Image (tube, helix red, strand yellow):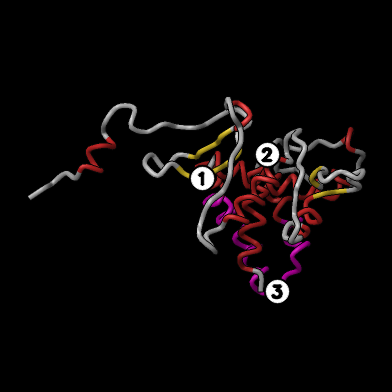
Amino acid sequence: MRTLTTESTAVLMPYKTQEIIDNDGIYYGINAISHNLLMCNRKLLLNGNGFILGVSGSGKSFASKMEIAMSALFTDDIIIVDPEREYTRIRKAVVAGKTNGHGYGILSPIAQNAIRDMRDMMLRPDVYAQAEEQLKVLLADIIKEVENGMDMNTAIKAAYEKIYQSVNPSFNYDEQFSLDTCYRDIPTVDMAMFTVARKLLNNVQK
């Protein structure tokens, strides 16, 4: 009886798994063996061309649209040749302002923040998991109020104030945010806390 398959043995061989974590890389998936992120910067390759293959419904369009969105966070020009107008909606969703006649533009601030949050969550999963456990306790009363129909904007404001007060108990949200930016005394808090707080509140919203 074989107790160790060829595939299992191969994982133990040196240099069997090549990790790809380039500076300014774009997320392309998960290493099937090590389960680490694949962050590749194709501009560092001798030939940076690429193509996406797959059967119908396997996610080719989604993968290309995600690459378009993440590439736009850098200084790359993006030219989309789209005879079937399949990419019109993503361009309208992420491009802000005028494109000056070109087939590319810059991401809107909201889209930039959303993609940065997504990328940060992939790069720091332990931080987000720890933040979620902390916030389930810290925001328990607010989460309960949202379940009972509390307005989401009010809940988010209350959650943010509690998060700031966990660092500085005397922090007053309305008082500080009524001041000009240069006069505000805002405690330093990891942005992961706010991202997870919004997620927890949205998950229980009716």
Q: Magenta region's main secondary structure?
A: helix
- Residue type at mark 3? Gly
Kindly identify which numbered label has been placed on residue 149: 3
- Residue type at mark 2? Val
Q: Residue at position x 67%, y 56% from top?
A: 198
In the rendered image, the vertical position of residue 87 relative to residue 76, given as above or below: below
- Give the Cα separation between the discs numbered 1 and 3: 38 Å
Within 10 Å of disc 2 (Cα), the crowding (few <14, some 14-19, many 20+) is few
Q: Residue at position x 61%, y 65% from top?
A: 203
In the rendered image, the vertical position of residue 125 relative to residue 206, given as above or below: above
Judging depth in this view, the residue of 141 and 72 nearest the camera is: 72
- Residue type at mark 1? Gly
User: Helix or strand or loop: what does disc 2 sit on?
Assistant: loop
Q: Give the percent coordinates (x, y) of residue 112.
A: 75, 45
Question: For this view, does 125 lie left or right of residue 49?
Answer: left
Over which residues does the magenta segment extend?
A: 132-158
Kindly identify which numbered label has been placed on residue 2: none
Asked whether disc 3 touches disc 2, contact meaning CB atoms under 8 Å apart, the reply is no
Asked whether disc 1 touches disc 2, contact meaning CB atoms under 8 Å apart, the reply is no
Judging depth in this view, the residue of 103 and 167 nearest the camera is: 103
Reading the image, the residue beneath label 2 is: 189
Sequence-wise, which precedes: disc 1 or disc 3?
1
Asked whether disc 1 touches disc 3, contact meaning CB atoms under 8 Å apart, the reply is no
Reading the image, the residue beneath label 1 is: 29
